[in-house]
Amino acid sequence: MFKRILFAHNATPAAERALLYVEHLARVEEAEVIVLHVYQKPDNYVATHGYEALVAALEAVAQEVVNDATTELQREGIEARGIVTTGDPARQIVEIARREEVALIVLGTRGPSSVKELLLGDVSAEVLRYAHCPVLLVP
C-alpha cells in the first residue's frame, strides 16, 4: 500500500518520535523512505556580511539531519535516501511528495503554538490541506 514514504524531518523531538513510526511502516510495507528537510534562508539578512556562510551552515545542518535519519533507517535494513531543499516548508513537502509519487507523508507536529498558527495554520495543517496522499502526523 505505502511503497514510497516521504518523511519530513524538521529536527524536532516530534520528528524524532515520528522516525520510529516511519521505520515501522517502512519495514511492514517494504517501502522506500525519502527523508526530507526543508530549511528557510534568512532573506532578511541577505545584505549582511557573512550571509553566505550563514546559509552554508544552515544547509550543512540540514544535510546532517537527513544523513543521520537515512543512516539510521538503512542500518535497520530500510531503503532510504535524502533530500535537502530550501523554501516554504509546507509547499516544498507537498511539491516533493507529488514529484516523488509518494503514497504517504509522515511528519511530527507540535500543534499550533499561537493564535496566529491556529487561525492561519502551521506546516502540518498546510500539508494536510494540500497533500495528494494520506498524511500521518505524530505528536
Image: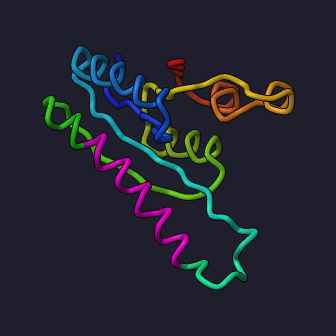
Q: Which of 17 and 130 is in front in this view?
A: 17
- Residue 126, percent from left and from top: 70, 32
Quarter of the figure that contains the N terminus: top left
Quarter of the figure that contains the C terminus: top right
The magenta segment is 53-70
**Is 67 on the left or on the right of 79, as rendered?**
right
Q: Residue at x 80, y 29 (%)?
A: 114
- Residue 45, percent from left and from top: 71, 73
Instruction: Please say whether residue 123 is visible from this viewpoint.
Output: yes
**Is 43 on the left or on the right of 78, as rendered?**
right
- Residue 109, percent from left and from top: 58, 25
Is 63 covered by the magenta stretch? yes
Colour style of the rendered protein structure = rainbow
Q: Residue at x 67, y 31 (%)?
A: 130
**How many numbered marks are there?**
0
Check the image and report above or below for 83 versus 126: below
